Amino acid sequence: MLIQFRVENYKSFDTEQKLTMIAGSSRNNSDHVYDIKGYSVLKTAAIFGSNASGKSNLIKAMAAVRNLLGFNIRIPPTDYCRINPSNEKKGTAFEFVFSIKDEKYIYGIEILLSSGSIQSEWLKCAKTGRTVTIFSREKDKITTGLNLDSNDKMFFAVYRSEAKNYHSVPFLTILSKVPPNKKGGLGTVHKVLRWFLNSLRIITAGGATGFRFTKRRDAFTKGVLPAYGTGISGIEYQPLDEMHNPIPPDVLYNVARNLNTKVVGDEPCGVIDGGAVGKFPFFFDENGRPMVKKMMFDHDGNLFEYYEESDGTNRLFDLTPILDPQDEEDLVYVIDELDRSMHPQLTKKFVRDFEKLSNSLRRQLITTTHESRLMDLDLLRRDEIWFMEKRDGASVLFSLEEFNERSDRKIDKAYLEGRYGAVPCFREIFPDPE
């Protein structure tokens, strides 16, 4: 679970900004809080603010670290905060504090984006009463606070030497070359990397959700869509005419080759996003060959293709796996513009349904939104409501908790009246007639 994220000198963030999921003094909705060995961690964070306030940049900051660690995608050299020219020569810093089961970890990295070189990097594990440094990197100097056995010392020395030749590659990525079955202290890096690549699920605005489509998830989705007033009573799959198959064979075979599981028969093994032409679940026939089918939505006997549905229905279809109570535990969903294309009441129901999920799932939802009707203290706690606004050109993040509002105040009304800031400021573009 995410406990805290901080960012500095990245895009519209100049000075350090911090999103904390640690519960504040609010007492309502106590079931929105997880207890993790002395930490009270929130289930949800909703971030409000005007257009261009920097909300999406917070999501992009998390995604930038994830992409760097897992896919070696370097952060562009001009992504430092350019409102101050001197920032080009300063490091850009990110830090995640998170838990895996009941162990707390701290991973941070500072990069000089203009050159791509890593200035510092650290991974720590906070155990009962003490914090152990798994590794600490200051440019070429890399140390560990672990009491390593002879084999681990050898691994650490080899990968520390390798890191000196790769100034732009995180040491966490390099150290993950340690055998994955390693039970010593260095084996922790695999657990941490899996958290970034699997448990931290980031969905950018308009981006693909990347959920694996299975028979069980198919059945769950068929139950959710009718409950949200979409008019859909079911989902069917129909064969595609080869002449009208929009998925090139090489794409289909590449996707099939990378699957961990291959189920032959009528169970969908995944879905290929065809963009404007729809989504195409793929299957394996009795000979083990991959094939795609056409997804059809049943409206009381009338069938419509995915692309014929409204954008809001398609958005809901993409997001329904977040509500799946049988999915993995300990997942952090970070979503830019949860409410995009969705009716305000539908968005509110989605958040309410998420909050109803059992706390045993240890699931979090962090989202940006313009839907002010979510500012309902019956729905969210004060410490789950955040604001982003520009001050002197830089993004600033702050919580409603700072205002210590009464539980009976109409927060959405007060927000739109400008009580908390983070609302658009307009100027007239046409002069008043004299």
Image (cartoon, rainbow, N blue to C red):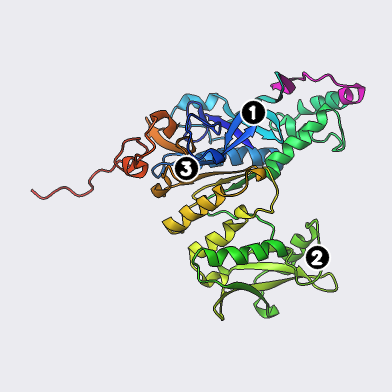
Element at label 3: loop
Which marked residue is nearer to the observer: mark 3 or mark 1?
3
Q: Is residue 259 above or below residue 244?
A: above
Q: How dense is the environment of label 3, judged by Cα within 10 Å: few (below 14), some, or many (20 and up)? A: many
Magenta stretch: includes residue 148: yes
> Where residue 81 sits: x, y (%)?
49, 32
How far separated are the C-alphas under marks 2 and 3? 41 Å
Can residue 74 be seen at all in this image of the molecule? Answer: no
**Which label was assigned to residue 109?**
1
Residue located farthest toward the right when viewing the structure as drawn: 150
User: Which residue lies under the disc numbered 3?
Assistant: 380
How far separated are the C-alphas under marks 2 and 1? 41 Å
**Which callout, 2 or 3, points at the residue further toward the start of the chain?**
2
**Which callout, 2 or 1, points at the residue further toward the start of the chain?**
1
Assign the N terminus to one quadrant of the image.
top right
Residue interval drawn in magenta: 130-154
Residue appearing at x 55%, y 47% in the figure: 355
Residue appearing at x 52%, y 47% in the figure: 336
Element at label 2: loop
Residue appearing at x 31%, y 38% in the figure: 418
125 left or right of 38 in image? right
Question: Type of residue at label 3?
Answer: Leu
**Which label was assigned to residue 412?**
none
Element at label 1: strand
Magenta stretch: includes residue 263: no
User: Which residue lies under the disc numbered 2?
Assistant: 263
